[in-house]
Amino acid sequence: MTIREAQDTVDQWIKSVGVRYFNELTNTALLMEEVGEMARLLARLYGEQSYKTPEEKEAAPAQLADEMADVLFVLICLANQTGVDLSEALIANLDKKTKRDARRHRDNEKLL
């Protein structure tokens, strides 16, 4: 699925199942909530925070994909309702980063 197809698919889902988009501020709050859930899981999977139960530890790897998809879904909702074409935005962003960071990371001794 391309990014454009994802935006179209989410839009169709919202209109057929979700009734309508939540307003932009509500979706921003939901995005922060979903990012927090993903961060909590990453802190347990790759950080120093422990799991609450053995079952939580067992479910964590599969849950990570679901949490990332939740973040992406809400981000796509925000893009759709604000008129942002994420494909175009990503291409422009990568171009900006390429020009700005052409030598930056290669010259960063911390990354060597």
Image: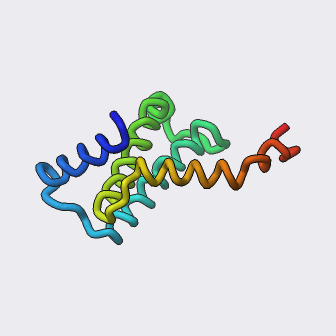
Above or below for 40 versus 112 = below
101 or 31: nearer the eye?
101
20 or 57: nearer the eye?
20
34 or 50: nearer the eye?
34
Residue 112 horizontal side relative to residue 31, left or right: right
Above or below for 61 versus 19 = above
Viewport quadrant of the N terminus: top left
Viewport quadrant of the C terminus: top right
Residue 89 horizontal side relative to residue 104, left or right: left
x, y percent for residue 2: 36, 37
Please name the colour scheme applied to the rendered image. rainbow
Residue 8 horizontal side relative to residue 100, left or right: left
x, y percent for residue 4: 33, 44
Locate residue 51: give its quadrant: top right
Residue drawn at (17%, 61%), measured in percent from left and top? 20
Above or below for 53 versus 99 = above
x, y percent for residue 90: 49, 49
Residue drawn at (30%, 48%), measured in percent from left and top? 7
Locate residue 22: give its quadrant: bottom left
Q: Residue furthest top?
A: 58
x, y percent for residue 38: 48, 47
Residue drawn at (14%, 54%), measured in percent from left and top? 15
Q: Residue furthest right?
A: 109
Number of numbered discs present? 0
